[in-house]
Image (cartoon, rainbow, N blue to C red):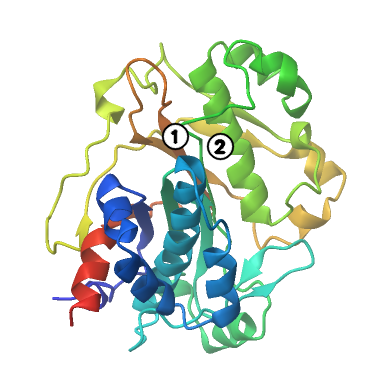
């Protein structure tokens, strides 16, 4: 049974697609034939040349970057084409963009994309069946915001540009000094708050065109309930192993998070006034546990949406297996 066969009733769940640049995928693409065949799946000469020309004599990091660019393009195409039930799972996706660079698709769902160093994630939310109407569908297809947006962000497992001791000195201005700064007493919480900020700006589609300290989060950590030390949030990709190339898995979600947007509402901020409603539901978990020696940090995932009581269904796509099967057909 294919992934498409399982993507039928989507109104009450949020689909979280993830994939990873694994050692197995790197080994697969180190074979020039496999890499070229995978590259040709893009069927876009300009994009193929762009990826191929990243470097002709790559070092280790450049090679990973090159492979990640290919993986990102294939992953987004495969996930979205699976959702829209396309016969060509690698067909090019034609994005539109709003004036602030947020990608838009003419389908009856909202989506958002984020990546960490070796992990890429795509979140998709369909409207509840009770909220669907012919008028809202028409509005969505014409490009208006008929459905409530969603935001996602992943923290990075390797952060060379951020000090793990002086992070607050570097980024103090983006946090509310009354409500947020007192909560951020370790590096894990700093990264968590960063994903909260990023997820919200991605939901409203503002990019950097907003003052990040004009909205704030209050998190009930309850003696560090949400932390990389809590075994409840230590991730292992196990679950219903329905197929070698993809699988369902589960994450434990932390949701004791409130957001305050009073300053933005008082200022009649354009991104806030454009929303259909002012409800926000924040959830965070850990996608990767990192290393004990902290050479790799835990990868925190945060999702913010506007519809309550929707469960999140994670789906891992394993491209080393998926491509091997596809190219051998």
In percent of the image, x 73 and y 20: which residue is there?
170
Residue 227 coordinates in the image, percent (x, y): 39, 21
State the image quarter where residue 165 is shown. Answer: top right
SS label for mark 2 = helix
- Is 275 placed left or right of 52 in the picture? right
As drawn, 233 above or below 13 = above
Q: Is residue 140 visible?
A: yes
Which residue is at the front of the view, 180 or 206?
206
Earlier in the chain: of badge 2 and badge 1, it is 2
Q: Say which residue appears at 53% left-offset and 13% top-offset.
A: 186
Closer to the camera, 128 or 177? 177
Give the quarter of the image for residue 237.
Answer: top left
Q: Quadrant of the C terminus?
A: bottom left
The answer to whether the residues at label 2 and label 1 have Cβ atoms under 8 Å apart is yes
User: Could you say which disc has been placed on residue 195 in the image?
Assistant: 2
Q: In the rendered view, tell whether residue 245 sits above or below residue 132.
A: above
Q: Residue at x 39, y 52 (%)?
A: 309
Circle 1 — which element? strand
Look at 20% across and 58% down and name the residue there.
Answer: 247
Q: CA distance from mark 2 to mark 1?
A: 7 Å
Mark 2: give few (<14), some (14-19) or many (20+) Cα within 10 Å.
Answer: many
Say left or right for 19 vs 203.
Answer: left
Q: Which residue is mark 1?
A: 300
């Amino acid at each position: 049974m294919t992934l498409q066969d399982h993507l039928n009733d989507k109104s009450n769940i949020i689909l979280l697609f993830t994939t990873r640049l694994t050692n197995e995928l790197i080994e697969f693409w180190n074979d020039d034939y496999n890499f070229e065949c995978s590259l040709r799946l893009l069927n876009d000469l300009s994009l193929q040349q762009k990826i191929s020309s990243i470097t002709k004599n790559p070092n280790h990091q450049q090679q990973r970057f090159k492979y990640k660019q290919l993986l990102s393009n294939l992953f987004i195409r495969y996930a979205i084409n699976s959702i829209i039930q396309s016969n060509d799972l690698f067909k090019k996706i034609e994005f539109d963009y709003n004036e602030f660079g947020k990608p838009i698709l003419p389908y009856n769902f909202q989506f958002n994309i984020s990546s960490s160093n070796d992990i890429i994630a795509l979140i998709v939310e369909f409207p509840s069946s009770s909220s669907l109407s012919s008028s809202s569908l028409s509005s969505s297809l014409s490009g208006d915001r008929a459905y409530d947006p969603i935001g996602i962000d992943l923290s990075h497992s390797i952060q060379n540009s951020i000090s793990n001791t002086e992070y607050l000195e570097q980024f103090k201005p983006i946090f509310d000094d009354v409500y947020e700064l007192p909560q951020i007493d370790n590096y894990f919480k700093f990264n968590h708050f960063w994903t909260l900020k990023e997820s919200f700006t991605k939901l409203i589609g503002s990019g950097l065109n907003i003052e990040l300290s004009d909205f704030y989060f209050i998190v009930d950590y309850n003696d560090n309930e949400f932390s990389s030390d809590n075994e409840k949030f230590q991730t292992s990709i196990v679950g219903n192993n329905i197929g070698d190339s993809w699988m369902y898995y589960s994450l434990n979600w932390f949701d004791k998070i409130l957001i305050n947007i009073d300053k933005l509402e008082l200022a009649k901020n354009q991104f806030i006034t454009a929303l259909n409603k002012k409800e926000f539901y924040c959830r965070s978990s850990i996608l990767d546990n990192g290393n004990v020696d902290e050479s790799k940090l835990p990868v925190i995932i945060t999702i913010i949406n506007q519809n309550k009581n929707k469960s999140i269904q994670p789906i891992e796509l394993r491209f080393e297996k998926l491509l091997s099967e596809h190219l051998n057909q």
